[in-house]
Image (cartoon, helix red, strand yellow):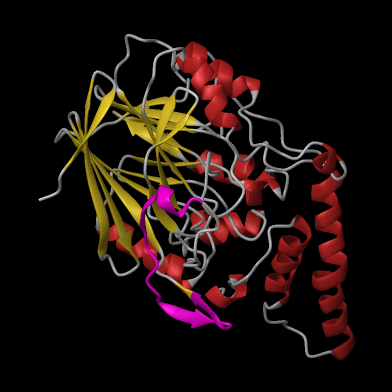
Amino acid sequence: MSQPPKRELKEYVAIGHTEAENHFRTQQSQAQQPSNSSDTTRTLTEFLWYNVFGFAYHYLKSRFGKRHPYQSYPQGEDNGIFQMGNQKGVTQLALLSDWASDTPESDAVGAVVASHSPDYSIHLGDIYFVGTPSEVAANFTSPKASWPRGKWGSLALSGNHEMYSNGDAFFKYLLPTMGVRERDSVRIQKAGFFCLENDHWRVIGLDTGYTSVERPFLEVLSPPDCHLRKEQLSWLREQVQLGNSADQRGLVFLSHHPPFSSFRKSFPEPAKQLSQLLGDAVRPVIWIWGHEHRMVVYHPKQLTNLPIYGRCIGNGGMPSEIDEPKNNKEAIAFYDQRKRTTLRRIDVGFNGFAWLTFDQEYLSIEYRDINDTLIYRELVRVEEGKFEFLPIN
């Protein structure tokens, strides 16, 4: 069976966020596969199947079909809490979001990350267009896929695009390939959230994707707010013990959706839920997300008792947006607005990723682009749960 053609970045320019459009784009990409037949009637039949019948079938199935059951972790050793493991005492993580577009640009970003040999690689969600099994394979699991797997493991979060196909491919085909190597065995990621930790830091992946899509009509009456489901909250409370005031490790939250934004709609509900878990103590967190296809560093923002150091890294594989902020421009500390090229009369920026280095109480975060150029760097020290942002020499 021949491999489908590589997608071009221009296919994603000005794409909307409706399920219907993204399902249609998926069908169009399948229709671009070369036909083995020169028969006109059969070619027309294939066109109708992929572009009309196929679109209608998959769209209606996703909108009205059964959603994949929500998965959580059992009590015990297989609890989704993974230990960072590196014999040198320094652990390096590569974070990519909105990367899985199966374009030459996403391949190039994956190759740059692979050249650095990360200990762990984490995808913060959105497999385009709608997270089908073929799209999971093209980006992550086929022999030619360019996902840069970490030496010690890879982990994944879901975005709204995975849920455009009811999450089936994410849970059935992607998560079984994700996990962390501990000693001589590999622990598989069995739910859409996780905790990766050491003696000084905890990196907690949050599932905001599952609740980002609702059924027709219901989403009008009650728009999705990306809240954390009760199973995830129970895991955070009982197994991660997030509310334990004696645990003063630095907190890094990862999610697909933003708790706040200067550009588009934000989803503050998960932050409110987390603040309730953390209790009355003011606890700063570094929160890294995607969803918006740009690279932004925000000044700290207080949401309830959470001072949030927000960073958006949604420029992994989609056309990187460089338009002006819609509101609260003064909230932005750094915004990569460099123009890389013009696609369909729209200026786009540079794709990239975040590189995190954990060294005892220190965390270095580097933001690098498709050419491996260092765009922005910050150095943080944690002590008794508080952050000190250090000057960069």
On the picture, is 252 further left or further right than 304?
A: left
Q: Is residue 6 visible?
A: no
Residue at 14%, 36% (x, y): give it: 88
Residue 310 seen in the current view: yes
- Quarter residue 55 falls in: bottom right
Q: Is residue 64 left or right of residue 226?
A: right
Depth order, front residue of 12/123: 12
Q: Position of residue 327 (x, y in %)?
A: 53, 53
Q: On the rendered image, what quadrant is the N terminus found in?
A: bottom right
* Residue shown at 47% from the left, 67% from the top: 322
Q: Quadrant of residue 49?
A: bottom right
Residue 55 on the magenta segment: no
Q: Is residue 392 above or below residue 197?
A: below
Residue 333 among magenta residues: yes
Q: Tell me where residue 211 sits by quadrant.
A: top right
Q: x%, y% of residue 309?
A: 37, 38
Question: Position of 39 compared to 391: left or right?
Answer: right
Numbered range of the magenta stretch? 328-347
Task: Name the residue at the left extreme.
Answer: 393
Residue 75, percent from left and from top: 52, 12
* Image point (52%, 47%), residue name: 261
